[in-house]
Amino acid sequence: MTEKLYEGKAKIVYPGPEAGTYRVYYKDDATAFNAQKRGTIAGKGAVNNRVSARLFRHLEAQGVPTHFLRELSEREMLVRQVEIVPLEVIVRNRTAGTFAKRYGVEEGRPLPRPLVEFSLKNDALGDPLIYDDAALALGLVGEAELARIRELALRVNEALKAFFLERGLELIDFKLEFGRLEGGEIVLADEISPDTMRLWEVGTGEKMDKDRFRRDLGGVEEAYQEVLRRVVGGAG
Ligand code: C5P
């Protein structure tokens, strides 16, 4: 077994078989609320790898550059080596989660236009919300990079909203991470999966994502499998 470069809460990163690549392994481990809640979701690693791969391919086809190269196995993908920008980029279409809590509003209220929010990627600090000027002042990102990240995040939102709607799911919100290639180009990185998105069933509003785990709603594995089925199975 090759030595790992990094192990996070849901993934392990190994050196890739070719120069300039990483091999990403998706685990079944699940955490929530900054790892205060821990568990496993059987089969999650395979679902998240396959869903992410499908979505990265779709986004590439829509002109969004990503780190994705190809799937290596059920739980592993090959990606391009990037330097991760230490920001969590959250896009919201409806109020939910920490946004609803922070501003004291009910969940599910549609937002008049998609909202882009940044958090500092720092577990010890609990990923605090950060505003543009602070991210720039701390040298985490450049001004042109930040504009590009915002533009790409909104483009991803439009592409994924339509993709999921065709599959009977509404994209409520999601988290993205971006990275820099060696030449400095910003590309979409990390993963896009039911761990990092909120998906509500059109019609019933049923939650089909990690909120089932966070909120002990039951049917967690089933929801992940259903998302996989719809994502790889295509529309209808
Ligand atoms: O918790 P919050 O409401 O801010 O989450 C917004 C979206 O970002 C949700 O879809 C959630 O799954 C995702 N998220 C994530 N990783 C985090 C924080 C949020 O994937 N560390």
Image: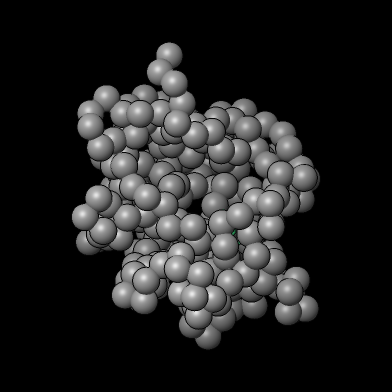
Tally the marks. 0
Residue sitting at x 54%, y 33%: 7
> In the displayed structure, would residue 117 be above or below residue 81?
below
Residue sitting at x 33%, y 47%: 82
- Horizontal side of 19 relative to 6 (left or right) equals left
In front here: 184 or 113? 184
Residue 105: percent from left, percent from top? 74, 79
- Horizontal side of 190 relative to 186 (left or right) equals right
Q: How is the image coloured?
A: one colour
Residue 47: percent from left, percent from top? 49, 36
Residue sitting at x 31%, y 42%: 81
The residue lying furthest to the bottom in this view is 112
Task: Tell me the quarter of the picture where residue 41 sits.
Answer: top right
Residue 13 in view in this figure: yes
The residue lying furthest to the front in this view is 138
Residue 44: percent from left, percent from top? 56, 34
Residue sitting at x 65%, y 65%: 128
Residue 214: percent from left, percent from top? 73, 48
In front here: 74 or 175? 175
- Horizontal side of 178 relative to 44 (left or right) equals left
> In the displayed structure, would residue 235 be above or below residue 53?
below
The residue lying furthest to the top in this view is 1
**Ligand 1 found in image quarter:** bottom right
Residue 233 in view in this figure: no
